[in-house]
Image: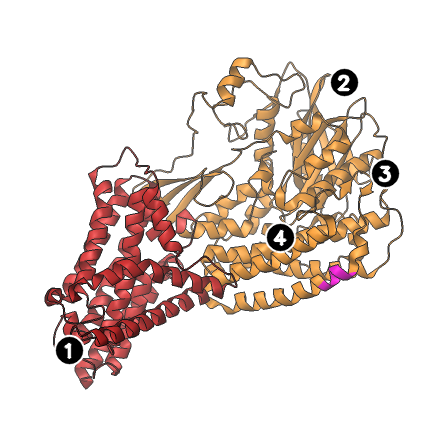
Amino acid sequence: MPENEEYKEVGKSEFRSHCIALCLSKKAVLRLMFATDERDTDNCFKIYAVFSEQGRDMFHIPFFRLREDDLTFRSITDGIPAAHWYEREIMDMFGLVPKYHPDQRRLVFHDSFPANSHPLRKDWTISEKDLNEWGKGVAKKVPHDFLKVEGEGVYEIPVGPIHAGIIEPGHFRFSAVGETILYLEPRMFYTHKGIEKHFEGMSFQEGVRLSERVSGTSTFSHSVAYCMAVERMAGINVTEKAQATRTLLLELERLYNHIGDIGFLCAGTGFTVGNATGSKIKEMLMLLNDRLTKSRYLRGVNTIGGVTMDILLHTTDISLTIDTVAKEYKNLMKLLLGTVSHIERLENAGRLSKETVMKLGVTGIAAKASGIEDDIRRSHPHLIYNKIFDAATFTRQDGDVLARMMARAEEAECSMHMIKTIVEVQYEGDLQVKADDIPPNSHALGYTETPRGSLFYWVKSDGKGRPSRVKLRSPSYCNWPAVPFAAQGNIVPDFPLCNKSFNLSYSGCNM
Amino acid sequence: MENMQFIIIVIFSPLIQGIIKKLKANFQGRVGSSIFQPYYDLMRLFKKEMVVSHVTSWIFRVAPYIVFVSTIMAAIMVPVITTKSTYSITGDIIVLIYIFAMGKFFMALAALDSGTAFGGEGSSREMMVSILVEPMIMLCIFTTAIAAGSTNLAVIAEQHNTILTPSHMLAFFAFMIAIVADTGRIPVDNPDTHLELTMIHEGMLLEYSGRYLALMEWAHYMKQMLLFTIVVDMFFPLGIAYDGGMPEIAVAFGSYFLKILFLAGIMSVVESTRAKLRFFELPSLLGGSFALAVLSLLTLIMIGR
């Protein structure tokens, strides 16, 4: 078992107080919470919560057992608000009911999904009738119970799930007075893909391809975190060369995302030239990706035990492209910061307070822009980050759209710097080590920092060394609940800008 | 023949839109679509099937025709290349502004009629912008009208000697900002956006499709070119023909297009170098240009030119 994971079984009734104590005494942050169906081996369900300690590379993972005679447990959401989506998801997926959860509505499944159907249970089947009705969309449409805001002049604006632009589906229900947003409730999970269930039917090696397809823009991060989880579970030590390659490509992925996002922010303010320039630089980086890996999204590189191709052969191409990008990027930032009308729009829009960030466990850029240094590359060093990640922090205090843009910009510059550092050094070792034996009945965490924030995978093998549970938590999943808080008090036409500044993935939720 | 000069507006207005789009694309470093793209778009829309919400009333179906016809009516009254036209006797510019207002009124009504959130939003925002823009346009017109001694556009266009006065320059700048606001361009509105929550003009058209949408779009192109033409008539009439003589009309035709292209160029520069304003900051921009318009009128009254 990896050294920085500390599992501890606690009683069902003490779980809540134990978690709250962890948060208070160790300044731990809830990173992920999930259930497993272990009725075939241990005759119970288990619920795990993963806390990462701040200031020390240690994950505290308390868990408790739930026997089938009582499938309810005491919710921890009232003590740790970050748990609110996880617990509702557990309720949908496993039928384990969090008592005293302030929001008892379904989360992942929409209201027309058959009741008492919990897909992540091992014995789950869906009846022919349900499948026909639900699969073909003829099931009774049950309207969702949105929170109502009452008062004189309050009206609701329903937006989506189909939007005027070509983006993924998501519904937003605004309650507004005039143009001012009083309350916003997003509703996601329109295209739930059942990825966690999918993993259970594959071998660990096949799972790499699936993990690459969870979220388009963080393809490489997902496969790194997944491979890392499996490697840690199997006790495989990846060579330095493979680690350097992974770090390099992670930073390339971060770079193209950040520059693309900074440019894309201009689409929200209607500053077309900035948008076009950002896209141009992003394209240069995507073409580099394509030359290096034959895939614009860096697919097909990772495998369990290492990487499949020697990217470090192309160091000249990488450093030349990065030099050009750095120059163009500098001009872009000069253009953006010099366009007063653009910056004016970003200032004070979509403010997210530090308290909200801490309570909801917000991660990545959104946390950094609100004054929380949340970077798993630093707090839990992995790959070769402890050697190349310098001490600079990117935190900003304002928490507005401009702060998020500047946090991105600083991180992008740091990525360019790291890429240059990586390609200057020679690394020893083979590309991959043999990884045939996956130990039965073991489990481990994998994690990395995507362009959007921290990403976690938790894998568990069954008696034959095949996946019995793969839980993944994308940064979008824990950042979506923060968007309504940032939108509150802004005017309706500014919402797309606030939303873009988080740049969350709809697909990243639908696991 | 000179009574048919409005045909120029009807035929060439999509081209002007195409040229502005092309210039904007070039500013962004893109090749952009052909300058004839708006014609293809209109043709495609005219052929397409219409989807009309069953909750709409007759207003929704009648509005595109009212908007289109009222814009053509306005086009008939405006001297494009020659001031000699039998309709231009009725070419009172105040009537013209209210014909525009009528089209806008029906457009807003139709958007409300469809009962969607975005239609309502678009209408209320468009009305707010109109409230700010209309007095500004009126003041600019008064400046030129007082200087020319007539509110008839043809008469105003015949006054060459008064063009480069301080009052006219002030009025010109105020009028240009009014055009930006009235045609739904950056920094007031973003014509190319797909973000339904930010839309003003596009929000009102969101429920339209097929032929109705084609009529609305075409009317919008014509209105844009008409506003340019009014600028040309009021501020740079040099070159416009006074009678129906062929050589004179040919010169007028050429100079008219050069001037329109110049204005289209200004529009694309303004759109490419600025971001859209936050909605509630519009009054400060439009208020500023209103002050310009007031100044232009004061200047005219105080220094007499």
Eye-nearest disc, 3 or 4: 4
Q: Are marks 2 and 1 on the same chain?
A: no
Where disc 1 sits, the SS reads helix
> Label 3 sits on what residue type?
Ile
Quadrant position of residue B110: top left
> Label 2 sits on what residue type?
Thr
Quadrant position of residue A208: top right
Between marks 2 and 1, how big is the CA–CA gap?
96 Å
The residue under the point 70% across, 26% down is A200
* Left or right for A167, reference B50: right
Q: Identify the residue under disc 4.
A: A257
Label 3 close to label 4 by CB (< 8 Å): no
Between marks 3 and 4, how big is the CA–CA gap?
30 Å
Residue B123 seen in render: no
Q: Identify the residue under disc 2.
A: A41
Q: Are marks 3 and 4 on the same chain?
A: yes
Counting residues from the N terminus, which is met first, the one under dot 2 or under dot 3?
2
- For the C terminus of chain B, the image quarter is bottom left
Where disc 4 sits, the SS reads helix
Q: Magenta stretch mostly in which secondary structure?
A: helix
Q: Chain of mark 3?
A: A
Eye-nearest disc, 1 or 3: 1
Q: Chain of mark 1?
A: B
Q: What is the crowding at mark 4: few (fewer than 14 residues within 10 Å), some, or many (at least 20)?
A: many
Q: In the displayed structure, would residue A349 be above or below residue A103? A: below
Colour orange belongs to chain: A
Q: Are marks 4 and 2 on the same chain?
A: yes
Q: Identify the residue under disc 1.
A: B148
Q: Identify the residue under disc 3.
A: A236
Between marks 4 and 2, how big is the CA–CA gap?
43 Å
